[in-house]
Amino acid sequence: LSLSLPLCVCRQYCTRRLARLYKSLKFSHGRGRYLKKSLEASMVTDERHLLIPLVAAERAWSYAMELKRDAGNELRKRAHLLGRLKKATIHAAELVSLCNQVGSARTALEAEAYSSYMFGSYLKEQERDWDRALAKFMRARKAFEQLARVGGPDQAEVCRERLEELEPNLRYCTYKRGSGAGGGSAGAMDEEDLAALKNDGGVDDDRLKAVLAEESGRASDTPVALSWRGHEIPMRNREARACIANAESQLAKIESTSAMTVERGLAVYDKAFIAYNDARQHLRDELAAAGGSAQGGGSDSAARLAEIKMADRTLAVLLSEKTIERNKFLVDSANAKLSGEIKLEKGEKATRPEDLVHLFNTLLRNYEELAESGPEVLRGVKGAEGLEEKIRMDCMMEQALLQAQRVAALGKVHLNAGSHVEAAVLFARAAEHASRVHDRAPGSKVAAAARKVQADARKARCTALADGSIALLALQKGLQTGLAAVSLQDAPTGGTEMHHLMDHLDQYKSAVLGKGANKVHITPIPPRMSTIAVRPIVLDVAGNEISYPPLEARATVKKTSTLRNLFKW
């Protein structure tokens, strides 16, 4: 903390954190008048009690470093600096005492490293006892080296950073000690400091053994088998078991969507998935090593390889199931936000029904993968004959339920878009899908969820039909109002005459300049409606009633012979 924040900000943060710790732990120092209250080992009932001396030491140390930066040659600030550093060493020693009594061996070793570094910094600034300062820094280096050996990769990286920070102090104290500037007396040092100065293990080696024994005991407490659907899968790899235990401890933090934000839930799931993937990587490394050593081996090596492969398949399926749980967590959160149960934070993007459709599609793909990979885990294992069909049936029922939920979400999408008829049809289809799921598996959890989906879909269908009817009536009323306003006459303009250029072709009126009533338009859009003359309609019905005179007498008929017609050519 002190290395990642500015000194002033760090001191202020530690002050506020210490006040919050006092209040939450009810560790007050009197009411009104200050009464000093010391923290005893018998009073430690919460892990946060150990933070009180730690935060107090950090506050004193950051204040001392701030004074060191601004002191210069002022003796008064120099004395104040040494006072704050001494206060930090007192709080660090109190932390070591508490950790030795109520903490684990690893916690005690971490506190010892912290206290040794604080005490060495104080002696270095005091510039009197260089032997003791060097001994304290060497004890801190020894403790950090041991912590790097017993911790994970993250702790090893932190310890390496602390070791790099210690090197300049060690070199400086060694130089001052060799020059004879205030070397100090060996009688002022305890046995641990003398052993550290002589580079002798002593008590530090005993602490390392205690930490290693504690870690091995913790690893032995981890179950040696992975339970999945009532079957025990052997898991001999210790690193993989530790990763699985870490993942399960992370997943135990998951709460309901009303008590946990989406960001926090996703962070917990991400940590668990990383732990599961690390466990699979350990198994793959072990599989590669076992495969290389099993060439030319016997049946034991083949059985060991089969066991590792089964554990890897189980972890893959378990990871798929946890992915489904995470996506369902997101669906529950989205539904709660859409229904208004969870209020959106400032600047948070609003949830849409389209997001639910995307999540349901993702869940359908997850169940397809689970239906393919799940039956392969325990194939051929004694007592797991009917498990394959059960997994497929479970996945099929979950997919049918998800299809009903997806159709209902699509109905909400159309309802928001104003397509009430399409939304009503989709809600009716969702109710049909949910009814089929309920009829296939009555009395199960899936049936209970299907019953809820069916009821919600029917309510939403009624709402869509009602909204559609209201919208249709409003549209018809608007059309009637618009048709009633249609007229062949120009509508009154409220006393303001609008000029059009086409009506004043014989006059000059600017169509560019002018505003309001003085602005001239080119032509009215739409054109004005006007009456026009049409041609008369003539119906010829009198001809049927007229009697015409005979005209056969006036017609002339030419008579010719047949023989003449034959030789006419």
Image: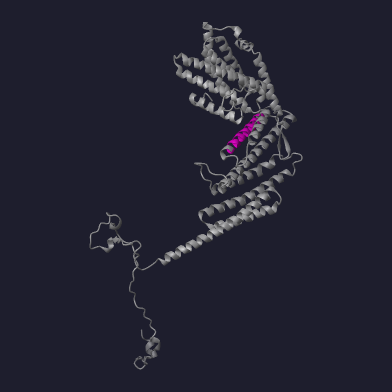
Instruction: State the image coordinates of residue 269 (x, y, percent, origin top left).
Output: 60, 37
- Single out the residue that lies furthest toward the front: 33
Which residue is situated farthest in the top direction here? 180
Q: Nearer the viewer, residue 286 or 78?
A: 78
Instruction: Name the foreground residue: 502 vs 102.
Output: 102
Q: Where is 363 relative to 211, above or below?
A: below
- In terms of depth relative to the viewer, which is nearer, 94 or 490? 94
Q: For residue 228, which quarter of the picture?
A: top right
Residue 331 drawn at (x, y percent): 59, 45
| Viewer-closest of 82 and 480 | 82
Which stretch is magenta? 265-286
Q: Residue furthest left?
A: 507
Magenta run includes residue 267: yes
Residue 39 in the image, given as x and y percentages of width and height = 63, 23
| Residue at 56% in and 7% down | 184
Q: Position of residue 356 (x, y in %)?
A: 57, 47
Instruction: Judge left or right: residue 479 versus residue 452.
Output: left
Residue 201, placed above or below residue 323: above
Residue at image location 68% in from the left, 31% down from the top: 241
- Please tell me how many numbered marks the rendered image carries: 0
Kindly tell me whether residue 114 is visible in this rendering.
Answer: no
Q: Residue sitting at 66 percent across and 16 percent down?
A: 205
Q: Main secondary structure of the magenta part?
A: helix
